[in-house]
Amino acid sequence: MIDFSLSPALLELKKRTASFVRDHVIPEERYLNEHTGLPAEKLAELRRKAREAHLYAPHVDEEWGGMGLDMREMSVVFEEAGHSLLGPLALNCSAPDEGNMHLLEMVATQEQKERYLRPLVAGDIHSCFAMTEPPPGAGTDPASLRTVATRRGSEWVINGDKWYITGATGASFAICMARTDDGVEQGGRQPRASMFLIDADNPGFQIVREIPSLDAHFVGGHCEIALRDCVVSDEAVLGAVGEGFRYAQVRLAPARLTHCMRWLGVAQRSLDIAAQYANTRESFGQTLGKHQMVAEMLADSATEIHAARLMIWHAAWVLDTGGKGRYETSMAKTYVSEVVNRVVDRALQICGSHGVSMDLPLALFYRSVRPFRIYDGPSEIHRSVIARQVLKEAALRAEEDETAREGQALPQRTTSSDASQGGDR
Amino acid sequence: MIDFSLSPALLELKKRTASFVRDHVIPEERYLNEHTGLPAEKLAELRRKAREAHLYAPHVDEEWGGMGLDMREMSVVFEEAGHSLLGPLALNCSAPDEGNMHLLEMVATQEQKERYLRPLVAGDIHSCFAMTEPPPGAGTDPASLRTVATRRGSEWVINGDKWYITGATGASFAICMARTDDGVEQGGRQPRASMFLIDADNPGFQIVREIPSLDAHFVGGHCEIALRDCVVSDEAVLGAVGEGFRYAQVRLAPARLTHCMRWLGVAQRSLDIAAQYANTRESFGQTLGKHQMVAEMLADSATEIHAARLMIWHAAWVLDTGGKGRYETSMAKTYVSEVVNRVVDRALQICGSHGVSMDLPLALFYRSVRPFRIYDGPSEIHRSVIARQVLKEAALRAEEDETAREGQALPQRTTSSDASQGGDR
Amino acid sequence: MIDFSLSPALLELKKRTASFVRDHVIPEERYLNEHTGLPAEKLAELRRKAREAHLYAPHVDEEWGGMGLDMREMSVVFEEAGHSLLGPLALNCSAPDEGNMHLLEMVATQEQKERYLRPLVAGDIHSCFAMTEPPPGAGTDPASLRTVATRRGSEWVINGDKWYITGATGASFAICMARTDDGVEQGGRQPRASMFLIDADNPGFQIVREIPSLDAHFVGGHCEIALRDCVVSDEAVLGAVGEGFRYAQVRLAPARLTHCMRWLGVAQRSLDIAAQYANTRESFGQTLGKHQMVAEMLADSATEIHAARLMIWHAAWVLDTGGKGRYETSMAKTYVSEVVNRVVDRALQICGSHGVSMDLPLALFYRSVRPFRIYDGPSEIHRSVIARQVLKEAALRAEEDETAREGQALPQRTTSSDASQGGDR
Amino acid sequence: MIDFSLSPALLELKKRTASFVRDHVIPEERYLNEHTGLPAEKLAELRRKAREAHLYAPHVDEEWGGMGLDMREMSVVFEEAGHSLLGPLALNCSAPDEGNMHLLEMVATQEQKERYLRPLVAGDIHSCFAMTEPPPGAGTDPASLRTVATRRGSEWVINGDKWYITGATGASFAICMARTDDGVEQGGRQPRASMFLIDADNPGFQIVREIPSLDAHFVGGHCEIALRDCVVSDEAVLGAVGEGFRYAQVRLAPARLTHCMRWLGVAQRSLDIAAQYANTRESFGQTLGKHQMVAEMLADSATEIHAARLMIWHAAWVLDTGGKGRYETSMAKTYVSEVVNRVVDRALQICGSHGVSMDLPLALFYRSVRPFRIYDGPSEIHRSVIARQVLKEAALRAEEDETAREGQALPQRTTSSDASQGGDR
């Protein structure tokens, strides 16, 4: 039955995370450099504290050193962690490592897990996910994938170009998507592809450059990568050959949602900062918050954050109860990414020149949240996905209505407008 | 724990309501006249069918002839009923009767319930709620209340003017708000007021006119009313003397939410109509739905309806679990009313000249949903309420953070940004 | 050189129009019935007064009984007339007659002008323009035109269906668009079409019904029309055979702009009403206008009306100086129609329940302006037209830049982003 | 009479500016460092070329080495220059020097002009304008001015704090606003203030720090400044004692508009880049520009840029013809700043990950245009100014209408909704 309560244990965890972020993480923000990120020893120290506070790797199974939370629990904890850009790093649940850990847990062999997952969870190494390609390769349209892995005996030879590979600098390995149909056109649109685990010291794996970008550097930059006769063994295949696109979905739907959770924390913190500012700064004889144009911005931000949170929780519930959540995570990603941008923008406006200055974190937030409307599928792509679902359901309903008018029994159907049923599981 | 599932019983009820609306209610829409509403015998017939289908008075306790649903169950059923403007009328859960029944159940004496509530649930009579006054009286600012009830022996003499009293024409009685402090200024801003049950045949209760209005006539028009030496006995007082404003809150928070539920149904139907149209109408060589500008409108409507539904469910849960829900229903009312307007507007745009014509119900919807952004508190008032809460919480948090910085134990607090806790219960 | 001054004569005309509307037209609004319009004798009286005030048929050449204003002058006068829905009727410059007069002036033979234009200007008759067809005929996509005129000796036999033909009830004649390629597919997409002058008493010209519609009835309803073996002579062809689509453009670009002018008057009047209301109505201890959320709505409306007016003036200048103005009128139509809707919506919100009531004209305005975002090309079509122009110019510029980089002389080019040059003349 | 044509001379100047920016300025963008700006020798070289191309200091009177353009001409030239963030620097018409030159021309003595204006125009020095103060000083509310200048014999001693003083690092002098009423409260709200020319090497003038900020560094950073017993002579007073706020208006209205002109160039360039990208990048089998969601963004940007340009031209005409333009520049500043932000945002979205990268200039534009919605009066302040004007005019009109109803002659009045008359001159 419809229920929005958090268990006492989760409430306690939520508060503990909030206190940790306030007391230990936010004070370290002063050491964050927009070009080089947080110094490695600072990060290590934060992770040590998070481990001590039993707040470490919340999304990973306990077997591998995490807390084993489900998606709904993650929704609560990741949002709290997200109040600081450093929070998810401290808890080792930041992108892209978090999504890679999830994928490895789901798909990797026991041996691969020991080799890659365990040290990743431990924070000894980090990783990247190499799917996106420069034009005319795979961007928003995965069917354009051009990187090719060719079998040669018991090895694969991979060639192609990747870019916008976040976290590549300093990563120990990449999960790399490549065509394994030798570039031969399939009947359908989508090529057959596979995922490969490539060690970063493979001589065929070259970082061409870090792409200077609007958002600040955190975890190894957004990189351009060249794969040049990159040779890997059969053991480097992640999961089954030819299942790359299916695995990408396994990674993408939850990863899309964990992005939403973390960024919602940034939105909530921005609203908190703006409200605090509006309570204390005076203008024209009263505090800013008494001016209705400011009040309106606060109200809209609070309302939209509320809606965004509920949408995340709902999609998390769909995933937790076995749904694929493609439609729901598309709605959540589009809505949350746009809400987050609006909320940060309003907070910055309320704080005026303070907001523009780096004295407050809002200017950095402003730069950091903008790309979220683009990566993991730009809003335009997700809107198309959503519309297709709406149209499909309308067609089904028209058919049903037709049947009903003809006096026949109605077929059983679960629609996703039936929000309680989670759509496309 | 966070849960969005509907019980099998509720799912069955939802589907049954949907079928009833589709098979019995929507076909009657052709008899709806924008000036005179649905003919009385048509309405009586619909209600007879609803009773037969066990879909009658879902919000009323079984003791009084209803189904005894809680707010979350109502959320699901009212939305389905709301697919037609006639649906809530058929189920006898339309405004203002629905809110009046609730208020009577909560506050009335057993005798008052027998006299007013029972025939109201039975559909033998209807009612109105007389609070709003023409300027400079009580509009969005209840402190401006000018209607005065003066005690005279065991009677009360009420004088004042009311307007925008929906459903007054043909109503058997009114629940009327009046000052009972003899117009004397109180220390605080809010006057003391009481509620009175006034029979419509009271000679002091005069309907001045029906105010022609943007929305169509359904249940007795929006009326201007003159109270002129309107004499009622002590038994006409609803609840306790002086508690009028508290009772208004008892009525308003849930009534605000049931409005949201019903209108959300109108939004969902509008989207359904537009999607169906987009599936079948061709333009420039493809169906409308394939044009991205149309797809975008469908996607935004679907996403916003989803968010609106979740926000209603959340506020319903807050009320069901004992919260007052003032903040949550303000957020829901503002958000839902604006979403509903946007969704109907987009549906009308997609359907083009069909949308403008009365051949589809969208033009009537367009007119009907607009006032919802004004009555029950215009968006501006609710945004102020929401902002005040945001500012109050920010002040509390600042205090807490201060305390935390001083190394002291944190006081326990539940914030309403803590969406799981329902805020102001 | 850039100049926004009005000549003293135009200023005087503007003020005279404003006074006329205030003193003579607005007082008649009380006689306006939303179903039957203004009584004929009231309209005749208004036109008599307009003629006396030398404010009659401002857009028509003096030869035919008008004032001979150019588009810029019309911009000023039509906006003032548009303060009342009855203003353009009074001045005999309302749609569709106004556009038809323009088309007849441009294209008709002297004989046709004497027969149709002269009594139309005199106000003795009225007319309609029959182009739009029910699906799958010509709606937003003119290439779908299905009404066919077949030559038979010196006559034409016209068959087809039209709908949304505004003003058809009571019209003396229709200007009707029909294919004159015998329905044969052309090489290109656009069929060859011609325009015909059809007398309404032609037995082959049948009004099927008036389509009930969101907007109020003014000038003969929006009608469905059946052309059934409708026989007309060669003299009924307006202009040259096969030039129908070219003439449609002759009519459409200016007609689109005169719509903008009139509706902008509705927007300005709505803002005036709201501002006046905000000056006098008190709430929470101060006038509404002192509340910033109200102030914001007033400011946005004033700013957008200002932008809309300048855009109309600019497009009018483009047409006056010989440009076709396709791009500029598309921008103006899209922008103005959306501004007008927003301004009326905000005014209604500011006036609260007064705004919803028919005591103020805002509720009627609200219904009347909505279709303007659909007819004369819905916003979606115009946005596509605008985008195509933007893309075309970008391609040209890329070519130029290429040339410049190669050190060659630049070709002369005038772009329409060069707002001073009026684009596509 | 309404006219949007540019004189042949202005058209030629416009094209020459465009070519100069394309051929000489944009290629230098690669040398722009977001922290240190353009190397001094690069800037000097650009200015030398601009002088050679007769494109230097377009806003300054020829007597002082400029081109003597009026505001309308500046509108055209500054927009073209604004296509690059370096363009206005190259032409020596960037903020804050440009506004300071204007103020010096209007107010300074001949001697002050020789000492400060001449080298400023020559590009030998640069300057800053020190008005804004940290809270609780003069921010958006100038009445809060706290810096005080106290007369001591023939000298003034200035004490106070300033911040967000753009361009202070490296400036040779500051124009500084200070109270000259010895801090005594006046009857009215606004204190008496004066402007002082302070040499940067004055020991009482201390740069405390550069405030790290969202936007990139160009012309000396946004600085915090401490005035500590800063002694200046009587000759340092700019204009008359006590006229500081009046002079601030002299500077602000045109400066507000020149900001709009320059930033509009950034918007136009962003649209050009996005359109060019949409013409060449393919996705899902067609160029991006063929996708309607992209087309819609292009169309909206083109339309809003068009409206913004016309609004700037109109306000420039008001100033050129002697109006103060307070209302018009407030409308232009609010509208243009928001349009510019939207256009850059859409362009970035269209270009996807390219847009986010620094490979295109959009990411830098995105950061640079955001503060424009805050400085020179945040949108909220300007909306209040605009609303007050709307309300004032409504009150006047109500009075007039009253008079008219009483049958008396109408007083002559010019309203600013009468866009042709420039309002408050």
Image (cartoon, coloured by chain):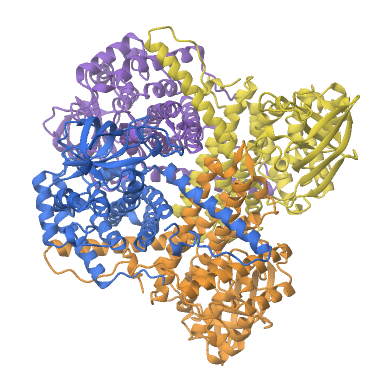
Chain colours: A purple, B yellow, C orange, D blue
Up the image or down, C108 lies above or below A149; here it is below
Q: Position of residue A52 (x, y in %)?
A: 32, 8
Picture residue at 58% right of the left edge, 34% below the top: B382
Q: How many marks?
A: 0
- Answer yes or no: is residue A154 visible: no
Quadrant assignment for the C terminus of chain D: bottom left
Q: Position of residue D271 (x, y in %)?
A: 31, 54
Up the image or down, A114 lies above or below C319; here it is above
Among all residues in the image, which is located at the extreme top?
Answer: B408
Residue nearest the observer in this picture, D44 or A342? D44
Picture residue at 55% right of the left edge, 73% below the top: C131
- Answer yes or no: is residue A54 visible: yes
Q: Position of residue D317 (x, y in %)?
A: 36, 62
Q: Position of residue A112 (x, y in %)?
A: 25, 21
Residue nearest the observer in this picture, D236 or A160? D236
Up the image or down, A367 lies above or below C79; here it is above
The quadrant in which residue C358 appears is bottom right
Quadrant assignment for the N terminus of chain D: bottom left
Residue nearest the observer in this picture, B89 or B329? B329
The quadrant in which residue C190 appears is bottom left
Asked if residue C350 lies left or right of residue D54, the reply is right
Among all residues in the image, which is located at the extreme front?
Answer: D153
